[in-house]
Image: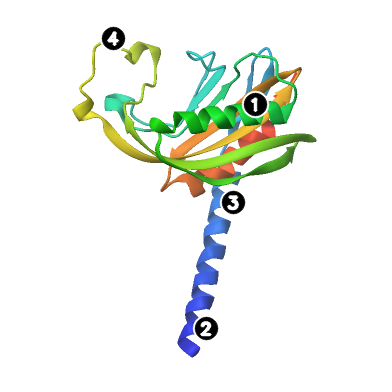
Amino acid sequence: MIEKKSDFTLRFALIGLLIFSYSFLSAQIKYKKIETDKFSIELPATWVNDVNYMFFQLMSLAPGDTCCGDFREFITVSSDGQPKKNLDDFYQTEKKYIKEGAKDMHKLKVIDEGTMELNGTKTNFLTYAFNYKGYFWYGRDYYTGIDLDENTFKEFNLVEKDYFFYFNNKGYMLRCTAKDSNFKTFEPLFDTVAKSFRFK
């Protein structure tokens, strides 16, 4: 009985230490305010931030090597630009697209979903895990236009947390992606970024 109680106390202490560490690391990160014609957002200052990146309105990429298709944590903002009735209409549409795309995201599993209030505005969120095998492109200048050998594709277990916003009859999705082994470390950072998201 004493051993079991000791194990429980140790586990509780470790969980508390992890939560404190995540909160402390998140608080130490410096952020940079990025402005677009539709919204503003605060992103990690040491990340590579690019407005109007390919088909994203914004992309933020964690520091690291862009070589060889390796994965780096990233954040994107996107919108299909199509009118939506309300937030739920946008959320259900995007959720359907995500599940239909599961053929490219093997073993897709919803971890959590719900609503939260950010800056006085109701927001939906969806967190899901999946296995991805492929190649990551991280810059316009890196695209070579050559066919890639699928045998060299790397496999990644990833977690994405999507935040869904609604403004002026249109939906916007803030997508935050990390390796499954790193997600809990990055989640406080992702939540901080989501809280900074404001429409003009």
Q: CA distance from mark 2 to mark 4?
A: 60 Å
Q: Which of the numbered marks, if any, corresponds to residue 41?
A: 1
Amino acid type of the residue that numbered disc 1 sits on in the rendered structure: Ile
Number of labels in the image equals: 4
Left or right: residue 15 versus residue 197 is: left
- Report the coloring of the rendering: rainbow
**Disc 1, SS:** strand
Instruction: Report x, y in % for residue 143.
Output: 33, 13
Instruction: Please identify, in this view, whether the residue under mark 1 or under mark 4 is nearer the observer.
Output: 4
Left or right: residue 192 versus residue 127 is: right
Residue in view at x 57 percent, y 32 percent:
95
Q: CA distance from mark 3 to mark 1?
A: 20 Å
Amino acid type of the residue that numbered disc 3 sits on in the rendered structure: Ser
Residue in view at x 42 percent, y 40 percent:
130
Q: Which residue is mark 4?
A: 145
Amino acid type of the residue that numbered disc 2 sits on in the rendered structure: Lys
Instruction: Report x, y in % for residue 60.
Output: 51, 26
Asked where in the image residue 104 lies, by quadrant, the reply is top left
Q: Which of the numbered marks, if any, corresponds to residue 23?
A: 3
Q: Which residue is mark 2?
A: 5
**Disc 3, SS:** helix
Please identify the quadrant where the C terminus is shown.
top right
Classify 10 Å Cα crowding around label 3: few (below 14), some (14-19), many (20 and above). Answer: some
User: Sequence order check: which comes first, mark 2 or mark 4?
Assistant: 2
User: Sequence order check: which comes first, mark 1 or mark 2?
Assistant: 2
User: Sequence order check: which comes first, mark 1 or mark 4?
Assistant: 1
**Disc 2, SS:** helix
Instruction: Please identify, in this view, whether the residue under mark 1 or under mark 2 is nearer the observer.
Output: 2
Instruction: Report x, y in % for residue 3.
Output: 46, 86
Q: CA distance from mark 1 to mark 4?
A: 32 Å
User: Sequence order check: which comes first, mark 2 or mark 3?
Assistant: 2
The outermost residue toward the top is: 145
